[in-house]
Each structure stands twice: as structure tokens, then as C-alpha cells.
Image (cartoon, grey):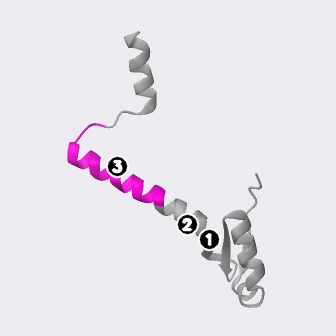
Amino acid sequence: MDTSIVTFSVTDLRHKTNEVLKEAVQRGYAYLLRRSKPAAAVVDINYLAALQEVYEDSLDIAEFDRTVKLPRILLEKHKQRKTRGK
């Protein structure tokens, strides 16, 4: 997996829109720089849909936890409890 950060300037977006979109679709996203600082991102629609789904799931979990008021158990503590119980 290529982990390099893809960046384009706002001018690139203006003059090379298809290239910017192609990279965003290929990699999932591309950063837009304004005056050499990150200003925004162009995101592939499928990547955005996946992010929205995960975000909505985390909100649902948080709401459930507030409603039920169950204490959170970290995975490591859960594993320790299971091994002690055997």
C-alpha cells in the first residue's frame, strides 16, 4: 500500500482538475494546499461513504453507552478477565 501523501495546490486544482480527481479516486483522497499549508481535501465518494458509515456507527455506540450506562472495558482488561476465569 502506498502511504505517500498526495498534495496539490489550489492552482493545480484550477488547471489540472482531472488529474487531482484521478488521484483522489485512486488513493481515496488528496490534500489541497493553499500557500503551502493544508487547506482542504478532495475525497473519493466511496471513501467518504465509508467514513460516514464508521462515524455514524461510533455515534450510535456512544448513544447506546449513554442510554445503558455500561462501563467501558478496554480490550486488554477484557482479555485479562477471560484468562483469569479459565
Amino acid on which disc 1 is placed = Val
Secondary structure beneath label 1: strand
Question: Which residue is pictured at 66% across the width and 77% down the height?
Answer: 32
Q: Inspect the magenta stretch and tell me whether residue 39 lies in it.
A: no
Give the mark nearest the N terminus, 2 or 1.
1
Instruction: Please identify the quarter of the rendering in which residue 2 is found.
Output: bottom right
Q: Secondary structure at mark 2?
A: helix
Q: Position of residue 64 (x, y in %)?
A: 28, 48
- Closer to the camera in the image, 18 or 83: 18
Q: Position of residue 18 (x, y in %)?
A: 75, 82
Magenta stretch in the rendered image: 53-71
Q: Earlier in the sequence, mark 3 or mark 1?
A: 1
**Residue 49 image offset from top left, x and y in percent:** 53, 65
Q: Residue at x 24, y 48 (%)?
A: 66
| Residue assigned mark 3 | 61
Quick check: 1 left or right of 60?
right
Q: Nearer the viewer, residue 10 or 46?
A: 46
Residue 29: horizontal and vertical position, in percent? 66, 68
Q: Is 52 above or below relative to 10? A: above
User: In the rendered structure, are the residues bearing label 3 and label 2 in contact, judged by CB atoms less than 8 Å apart?
Assistant: no
Q: Is residue 77 left or right of residue 11?
A: left
Rendered residue at 69%/85% (across/down)? 10
Q: Cβ–Cβ below 8 Å for labels 2 and 1?
A: yes
Residue 8, image quadrant? bottom right
Q: Main secondary structure of the magenta part?
A: helix
Q: Earlier in the sequence, mark 3 or mark 2?
A: 2
Using the image, tell me which numbered label, if any, was put on residue 48. Answer: 2
Say the numbered circle drawn on residue 43: 1
- Amino acid type, label 2: Leu
Is residue 59 shown in magenta?
yes
Q: Quadrant of the C terminus?
A: top left
> The disc labelled 3 sits on which kind of residue?
Ile
